Amino acid sequence: MNSAARLAEILSANAGRAGPLLPILHDVQAAFGCIDRDAEAEIAEALNLSRAEVHGVVSFYHDFSAEADPRLVVQLCRAEACQARGVEEIVAAGERAAGERVCLKTVYCLGLCSVGPAARVGDALHARLDAAALVALIEAA
Amino acid sequence: MTLIRISDDALALACGADAVAAAFAAAGCTVERVSSWGLHWLEPLVEVGGIGYGPMAPDDVSAVLAGTSTKSIGMIAEHPFIARQQRLTFARAGKTRPLSLDDYSATGGWAGLTRARSLSPDQVIAEVTQSGLRGRGGAGFPAGIKWKTVADAAASHKYVVCNADEGDSGTFADRMLMEGDPYHLIEGMTIAAYAVGASQGYIYVRSEYPHAITKLNQAIVLSADIIAPFRIEVRVGAGAYVCGEETSLLNSIEGKRGEVRAKPPLPAHQGLFGQPTVINNVLTLAAVPHILLEGGAAHYDSHGVARSKGTMPIQLTGNIKSGGLFETAFGITLHELIYDIGGGTASGRPVKAVQVGGPLGAYIHPDRFDLPFCYEEYAGVDALVGHGGIVVFDDTADMGRLARFAMQFCAAESCGKCTPCRIGSTRGVELIDRIRSSPRGADSVELLPQMHNARKAGRSREEDIALLEDLCETLKFGSLCALGGFTPYPVLSALKHWPEDFT
Amino acid sequence: MGYEPQVDFGTPEVQSETVVTLTVDGRVVTVPTGTSVMRAAALTGGSIPKLCATDNVQAFGSCRLCLVEVDGMRGTPASCTTPAAEGMVVHTQTPRLAKLRKGVMELYISDHPLDCLTCSANNDCELQDTAAQVGLRDVRYGYAGENHLGLEADTSNPYFDFDPSKCIACSRCVRACDEVQGTFALTIDGRGFASKVRRPATSLIGASSGRPWPSVTVSYATDVTPLRSRPLVCSGSGAR
């Protein structure tokens, strides 16, 4: 399916919702890895919003990006509870392992605060990480 | 065939529960995936005939089946961590399959809703008011009063919105409830909808909780006939802590930037899509089914102290030996929670500080560990009960760095609408860096000759600390919402109790 | 010389069949129900510092300069978003408020160019006036911190320039575009410290028009400003 058809499908799938913009943006981000200018314009048109309104929303939320990043993403929690369990001491090893290939992203809280440091790859969660476990996780990603 | 029960909660999965479950299945056992007991240091925890084993690895399976495992903790229900609790909201934790309607009904599910529907909406609200239930999201506003306001508002559409944007570090109770007992939340919301006359509900869940989102979506489909004519839809956040603030959450559901709205108007008057809206936290709504049981309100009210009534699911996290979910009546002290129940730090080192109530909560010094856990007592010492998260730090913690992190977090998550939070959080990070730096120098711009009226000598540490205190006052009283307004709590508490960490 | 500045009451006039009477700094004033404390104060002749509020768009509550104290109310509510209530006793000038306002202004100026004398808005600048009004004399943060001073000005519109380094992100232009003009051509891009006013890029404006800045702001500037004889949109001199 080409991207225009996919976008149209997403728009029609969310047509019945009240306040459909965020669900649409999630679907577009998942389908294309980003929400680019053209997609913003299409979405605006479909929802009878201005392009400025859609862009303002896209740029507000960290889950949405204007450009696709082909790298794999590993989210590492660096909030207080994981800090208390030593996450800051393993960040450097994780960054070295990630290099250019993997995007090691900071996330604030995965809700695994009693068993941190914690990380997320896609929908898979990992807890009780030490430097070796984090490196292994990144290398396997 | 041996029946093995293992949690499929996200935390258990993160600790490797699937591999353990697969190993038991491969050994010919019947494996039931249930909710988590909340004994997190023992996850993956397996239950065989009431006896718990944990933390389990796939290699431990044969020993458990042979009866030779050294990882037995005895009867789980009698474990001190469980036996000491008063579980009303988490009564099913560890005991039922999250999506099983049979399990839910067999453990008293829908009884609160059935009874609520036999009462008038006014009577339902009266019982919620009588129970003393207050908002568990942090603000502690009486739930019954909020419901009454919405019930009394004249409007063609009303909404019940569940705030499941659990972004505070050190909290996971919402997540556990949504993943482990989703019908319980759905029942609570349906009771709220009946009480106020709403036909549509939304659960706003943060995107960092994919398992909760999946479970809720499945549970909503499976229970649709039971809760009809009420309907619920899950809405997924998109990476914005500030959307846990109720008005910004409403904007987010409406498809807008998650900026905070000025109040008034209150959401109870003009909330979602401009209509009267009940917006409550997961734990608030999940307390409701119990309250609506016969005598439930009085029973709930009989727990707790003074104006902090009922139970609070407290989350023991961070550097703690026995971390997990501990639901108990208000009034318990930090000393009991951290030492008697939590067993002290995981590292074995002395406790230096605990942060209660998330990233906006104060750091509490061990000399205040006698403080009873309740809204008013905490407010009295500039601390927050918040969402009941407790993060323990050992003596290696650098409180100056944590104060800096509080400002950094505020800067990262600020919606940018109000000036104190938008600019002040960034200045706060820089200022704490300046306070902690040495040697101290003058501002490079102020040194320029054109800057004729500017200060030429560097500012002293004392002057910078006074400025940090002023900044905190500007944030506290000037900010539009609690993100900027409460960031001073961790900063000033760290500065007050551990000034040596700011050099 | 230019124009006779008119009083800006801060928030729009409210129509109501009922009225409330309140006291602002000892002066009794009766206003239609739903009127903001800020407008009530302005009607008594008082002047509460403000930057994001102006009386042709709805109250927004973002600049936090218009904080007041109200007897019996906790904290320091923003007067623009607080409706006047019967019997309310409001204080708009107290030492505590003065300190808070100065604290907010100190933050603004820590991220603002220091070129007032050569700025085209000199002497016609609400930010400058308000800084004077709150008595800011020293920016204790210094000026070396993170800032927006390096952002490039957009001079593509024949009617005005937009200098983002001078923008205070009050959203007035965005709101005027939405509420007055109904064009919804502007937005805040990003969030937090990185928030900045933006119109979607030229390629988004539409193949047919290709106009760089939306016409909304142009007509706003030409149609509305003369009527009111004062600059209505920009308080922080981002657009001139």
Image (tube, helix red, strand yellow):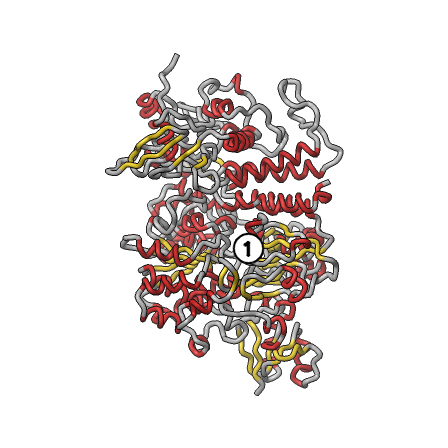
**Outermost residue, top side:** C1
User: Residue at left 66%, top 77%?
Assistant: B73
Residue type of the residue flagged with mark 1: Val
Q: Quadrant of the N terminus of chain B?
A: bottom right
Q: Position of residue B31 (x, y in %)?
A: 56, 79
**In screen coordinates, is C105 left or right of B155?**
right
Q: Position of residue B162 (x, y in %)?
A: 43, 58
Q: Chain of mark 1?
A: B
Q: Is residue B319 above or below residue B96?
A: above
Foreground residue, B71 or B350? B350
Determine the image quadrant of residue B219. Answer: bottom left
Q: Is residue B418 visible?
A: yes
Q: Is residue B37 above or below residue C212?
A: below
Residue annotated with mark 1: B385
Q: Is residue B183 visible?
A: no
Q: Position of residue A76 (x, y in %)?
A: 62, 55
Q: Is residue B109 above or below residue C70?
A: below
User: Residue at left 35%, top 56%?
Assistant: B148
Q: Quadrant of the C terminus of chain B?
A: top right
Under tag 1, what secondary structure? loop
User: Residue at left 46%, top 72%?
Assistant: B99
User: Residue at left 57%, top 75%?
Assistant: B6
**Outermost residue, bottom side:** B1
Determine the image quadrant of residue B468. Answer: top right
**In screen coordinates, is B398 left or right of C3?**
right
Q: Position of residue B213 (x, y in %)?
A: 47, 62
